[in-house]
Image: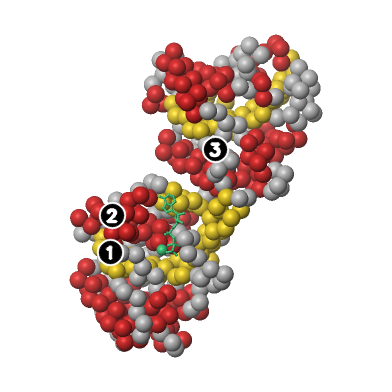
Amino acid sequence: MILAVSLSSSNIHETIFRFGIDGLDEYYYGVLTPGTIITVAGHPGSGKTTFASQLCYSNATEGKKCLYISTQEPEEKFMKHMARLGFNFEVLLASDTFRFVRFPLISSEEALDSLLESITNLVVEFKPKIIVIDSVTPITKAIQSDIKRRAMLQNFFYNIAFDIKGAIVLVAEIPLGKEYIEEAGDVEFVADGIIILKHSIEYGLLSRRMEIRKLRGAPIEVSEVPFTIQAPEGIVVMMPPKSLKPKYYLKYFRTLCQELDERIGPLRSGELVLIAGPPHRLLLGSIIKWALRVARESNAKLAIITYKGVEEEVKEITETFSKTLSLSSDNINVAILNAAILSPEALLSSEINIISKIKPDIIIHYGTETLRILYAKTYPGLFEKYKLIGKSLLRKYNALTIEIQSITDISEVSADLNLADTVILLGENVKGLPEGKLIAYKAIEDKRYIDSLEKIEKCIPIS
Ligand SMILES: Nc1ncnc2c1ncn2[C@@H]1O[C@H](COP(=O)(O)OP(=O)(O)OP(=O)(O)O)[C@@H](O)[C@H]1O
Ligand SMILES: [Mg+2]
């Protein structure tokens, strides 16, 4: 059996490889240095291949060659799946920064020797910086003896990682019904990092979570994060942002209601504003028109994310009114998300995705009571949890976020009231609010303003 390869004896330079996943690279940048072995484990369909390919793709795109060794799907199938996910491996193949090799399953230790020899030859010839073994399970299973298996992993893979001054990703399978890697002792001890991908059915929808079990050389600040798999990003994790508050306010926005501007204004980037009131006072069309006027006034980029509304209608109102205001369509974006078919994680990641791509100055978040209606009773705590994660994530982008929620009772927004920087409440048929009053306050400045709803209803975003 081949136990080691020696391609070079020079010292390891501190090249840093990327996970290719935003949140992980933000938190754990510097973990993937030359000589690192990362194990990605999970049940069938948990996203192991996607994780490994994404890591491979993002490094190969930066010119760090990646060798993908598969014991599973053939190249054609792999390429097709990856293209659908948004990874253009064809280009990398053409530039010879990526290679895919499929090895047949091995059934004996003799076959293993020849497999390891083939891998060595490939590595010597191609000189990759990243090697993925998808999966290592058939290899570890072919070795009966625990000691031999450990020696193979430790000597062969560890030495390869060291010699190529690169990183190795070992994909390990966890059978359905089991919660651990069968050869766990070996694969887990050899690896510098262990990431377990999990998926389950929650609230009737698919829910994915990533457990960061071990990462040598980094404190694990967040150990389990929800994630989604979506095109064209692949895996999108929902790491809480490292810093919560914006350091400074970039822009100021007028509400276009003189009364409000004078007393609680202006609204600022990085701020969370909650507007809550009865549904008939917060019609989507009126909100869109108001938001467009606010955006025009401050020459701001606007993203409208709504959980309610018919796509064609919402788009038509937005387009027509943008034209009336001579607003460029490049600065206006509308997304209608269906909270009934997307898990809270998927909703959040779609939003983060939209926001990180568009980088809007103002985000209008409409119809968020939908989440409360869907989850508050059946899954108590979940609604608040996702609100918290979502809001802290939104803050990261330093946009002014205006959340519009329909309520019938002020207690429905108690969590939001604590999270918002500025609150505007419309008291009309809402339990717990004084009838016919508008209450507005800026929590951070302790400014409070109460007036009759009737008096200012002409200038605030109500029908
Ligand atoms: N284009 C896509 N858009 C959204 N989700 C996708 C897309 N392609 C794949 N997925 C999701 O990713 C999952 C499969 O991920 P992947 O193949 O990475 O899992 P795996 O853990 O490697 O599975 P296996 O154990 O079978 O090898 C699919 O079940 C599917 O839900
Ligand atoms: Mg796979």
| Helix, strand or loop for disc 3 | loop
Q: Please state if 202 lies on the left or on the right of 298 as rendered.
A: right
Q: Amino acid at mark 1?
A: Phe
Q: Position of residue 348 (x, y in %)?
A: 54, 43
- How many residues crowd mark 2 within 10 Å: few (<14), some (14–19), many (20+)? many
Q: Earlier in the sequence, mark 2 or mark 3?
A: 2
Q: Is residue 393 visible?
A: no
Quarter location, residue 115: bottom left
The quadrant where ligand 2 appears is bottom left
Quarter location, residue 33: bottom left
**Residue, disc 1:** 100
* Mark pair 2, 3: CA separation: 32 Å
**Residue, disc 2:** 89
Q: Quadrant of the N terminus?
A: bottom left
Q: Position of residue 192 (x, y in %)?
A: 45, 70
> How many numbered circles does the render carry?
3
Q: Position of residue 3 (x, y in %)?
A: 32, 84
**Residue 384 vertical position relative to residue 235 in the rendered view, above or below:** above
Do the numbered discs 2 and 1 sit on residues whose CB atoms are within 8 Å? yes
Q: Amino acid at mark 2?
A: Phe
Q: Residue at x 44, y 88 (%)?
A: 145
| Helix, strand or loop for disc 1 | strand
Q: Residue at x 70, y 22 (%)?
A: 426
